Image (tube, helix red, strand yellow):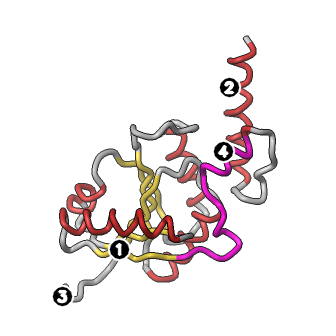
Amino acid sequence: MHTKAKISVCIYPGTFDPITNGHIDIIKRARYLFPKVRVLVARDANKNTLFSFTERVHIVKTVSSRMDGVECEGFDGLLIDYLKKNHINIVVRGLRAVSDFDYEFQLTLMNRKLYPSVEFVFVMPGEEYFFLSSSLIKEIASLGGDVGEFVPKIVEEEIKKKLQTHETRYKS
């Protein structure tokens, strides 16, 4: 076990492509537990994202700017390197289902191997968000469905703009 340290900030990392009301619920719950939450938007070149890295950072910054004690930053590379460089050792992750647990368990063990003083705090969203995922939001929107009740207004608007741009490109 580690010696007790004063915690000033926790990290909530993800690609947030796009950020959903479920993510926002996790941020609010983390903020209840910690004085400051830093939402880290990962570049993650291995994922085929709808929004560019810059767009995702902008959207998350816009959404989080209205939340007291919450800040947003983009990052590239290993989360562990970011944590070490910034002397942060608390990471918040959301859990919705058993499938999330399997992935997060493996990730946690590897990260602890790389940075033994890191602690992961798993937070479950409200029941109304258990089914939400960014992938599902993108799929519904791409098929013409309404995602307004699942994402902040700015996200809904940005998805519509992005999909209209894609449709225009393919019709040409």
Most extreme residue toward the top is 172
Q: Please give the range of residues in magenta.
A: 124-141
Disc assigned to residue 166: 2
Task: Give the class, few, some or many, for how many residues have Cα within 10 Å of label 3's Cα (few <14, many ≥20).
Answer: few
Please give the name of the residue rendered at 45% of the width and 55% of the height, measured from the top-left corner: 14
Q: Position of residue 90 (x, y in %)?
A: 33, 73
Callout 4: 10 Å neighbours few (<14), some, many (20+)? some
Q: Which amino acid, by three-letter code, is at mark 2?
A: His
* Up-down relation of residue 119 to residue 150 (above or below): below
Could you say where residue 113 lies in the image, as x and y percent from the top left?
Answer: 19, 66
Residue flagged by tag 3: what amino acid is it? Answer: Thr
- Horizontal and vertical percent position of residue 38: 42, 64
Q: Quadrant of residue 20?
A: bottom right
* Residue identifier under label 4: 138
Q: Nearer the viewer, mark 3 or mark 4?
A: 4
Q: Which mark is residue 120?
A: 1
Residue at 26% from the left image edge and 64% from the top image edge: 111
